[in-house]
Image (cartoon, grey):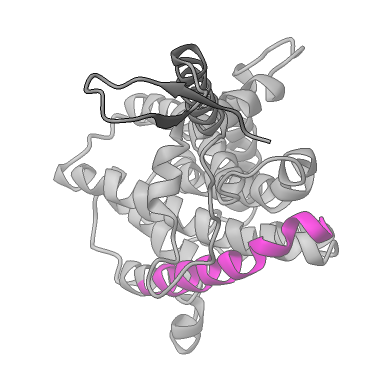
């Protein structure tokens, strides 16, 4: 039961009833409310922000903002692959230069000495090396990117990041080797006394097209390999067949005119001929136009399929 005190007001008009709450109790309640409010604020501050992962909508099929936000992770993935590749090797990065030299020597002996294959007026070693510059990047990117998602299973199943970074890092790792192949080609040009012309200015654009082709096909094969492991057995055979379907050891003049439309659907035909034209000059390769169209279509199909399939990677990898 509540207790009441009888107090006398200032004017003597009669008794007034008041509750028995002291000032001390009122202050303690106010302090309690302040402490509770501070605790609630601290609890809200400690809660990490919520990230909502949604499927792409409309034309937002390529995660440009996410790739840019995770650019440091892309750098570390590339650096990790480079370190692992040359770890505990006696010659290290020298292997990158020895590979095109050994392959160009073998092709020169077989196709130039034995078969007398035409080389478009160029010394045959220069003819082959100019084609090996784009081909080695493409072949290495194809092999590494197709296996990249399965090889990084521990990352796919534990944390979130743009999955496209993994095959992209594999392609960029392979592109580092191309610069050493260009050094070997430059030495061959100096040895044979071949100068370069204004067409060399188009070389950076050809490198971008080459990277787009490697990324597009690498994305498609890496996504397919997650679901169908037969892909990792097909890729070496595909690369071997693709080598002979590309004018690396022979000239495109050996291809019959009635087959050229089908032959030019190979995107590497225009790129290889474009590299030769940019480095050694000559007539503009018209197959480069069809290569650009094929690369654009392949890239679009690959990105769309990869983005649709990536939501299931962690479940089936």
Q: Position of residue 25 (x, y in %)?
A: 52, 17
Which quarter of the picture shows residue 69? Answer: top left
Q: Residue 144 versus residue 135: which sits nearer the camera? A: 144
Q: Position of residue 49 (x, y in %)?
A: 51, 39
Q: Position of residue 196 (x, y in %)?
A: 22, 38
Q: Is residue 59 left or right of residue 222?
A: left
Q: Is residue 313 left or right of residue 242?
A: right
Q: Quadrant of the N terminus?
A: top right
Q: Residue 266 versus residue 152: which sits nearer the camera? A: 152
Q: Is residue 311 magenta?
A: yes
Looking at the rendering, the stretch of residues picked out in magenta corresponds to 293-317
Can residue 113 be seen in this snapshot? no
Asked if 26 appears above or below 167 in the picture, the reply is above
Asked if 170 appears above or below 164 in the picture, the reply is above
Q: Main secondary structure of the magenta part?
A: helix
Asked if 185 appears above or below 65 in the picture, the reply is above
Q: Is residue 36 left or right of residue 81?
A: left
Asked if 267 appears above or below 87 in the picture, the reply is below
Residue sitting at x 68%, y 57%: 222
Residue sitting at x 39%, y 41%: 68
Q: Is residue 38 magenta?
A: no
Q: Residue 307 versus residue 219: which sits nearer the camera? A: 307
Q: Is residue 13 left or right of residue 129?
A: left
Q: Position of residue 190 (x, y in %)?
A: 33, 25
Q: How many marks?
A: 0
Can residue 150 be seen in this snapshot? yes
Q: Quadrant of the C terminus?
A: bottom right
Residue sitting at x 28%, y 43%: 204
Residue sitting at x 46%, y 23%: 6
């Amino acid at each position: 039961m509540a207790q009441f005190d009888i107090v006398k007001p200032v004017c003597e008009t009669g008794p007034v009833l008041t509750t028995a709450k002291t000032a001390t109790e009122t202050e303690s309640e106010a302090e309690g409310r302040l402490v509770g409010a501070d605790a609630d604020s601290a609890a809200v501050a400690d809660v990490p922000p919520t990230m909502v992962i949604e499927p792409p909508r409309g034309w937002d099929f390529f995660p440009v903002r996410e790739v840019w936000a995770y650019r440091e992770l892309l750098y570390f993935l590339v650096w990790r692959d480079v370190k692992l590749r040359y770890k505990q090797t006696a010659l290290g990065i020298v292997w990158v230069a020895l590979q095109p030299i050994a392959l160009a020597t073998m092709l020169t002996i077989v196709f130039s000495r034995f078969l007398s294959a035409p080389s478009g007026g160029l010394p045959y070693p220069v003819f082959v090396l100019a084609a090996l510059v784009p081909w080695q990047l493409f072949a290495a990117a194809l092999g590494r990117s197709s296996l990249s998602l399965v090889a990084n299973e521990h990352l796919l199943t534990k944390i979130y990041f743009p999955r496209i970074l993994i095959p992209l890092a594999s392609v960029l790792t392979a592109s580092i080797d191309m610069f050493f192949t260009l050094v070997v080609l430059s030495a061959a040009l100096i040895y044979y006394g071949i100068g370069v012309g204004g067409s060399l200015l188009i070389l950076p654009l050809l490198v971008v097209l080459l990277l787009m082709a490697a990324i597009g096909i690498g994305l498609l094969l890496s996504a397919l390999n997650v679901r169908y492991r037969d892909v990792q057995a097909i890729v070496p055979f595909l690369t071997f067949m693709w080598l002979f379907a590309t004018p690396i050891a022979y000239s495109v003049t050996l291809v019959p005119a009635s087959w050229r439309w089908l032959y030019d659907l190979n995107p590497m035909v225009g790129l290889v001929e474009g590299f030769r034209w940019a480095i050694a000059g000559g007539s503009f390769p018209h197959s480069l136009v069809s290569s650009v169209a094929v690369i654009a279509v392949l890239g679009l199909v690959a990105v769309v399929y990869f983005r649709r399939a990536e939501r299931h990677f962690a479940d089936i990898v």
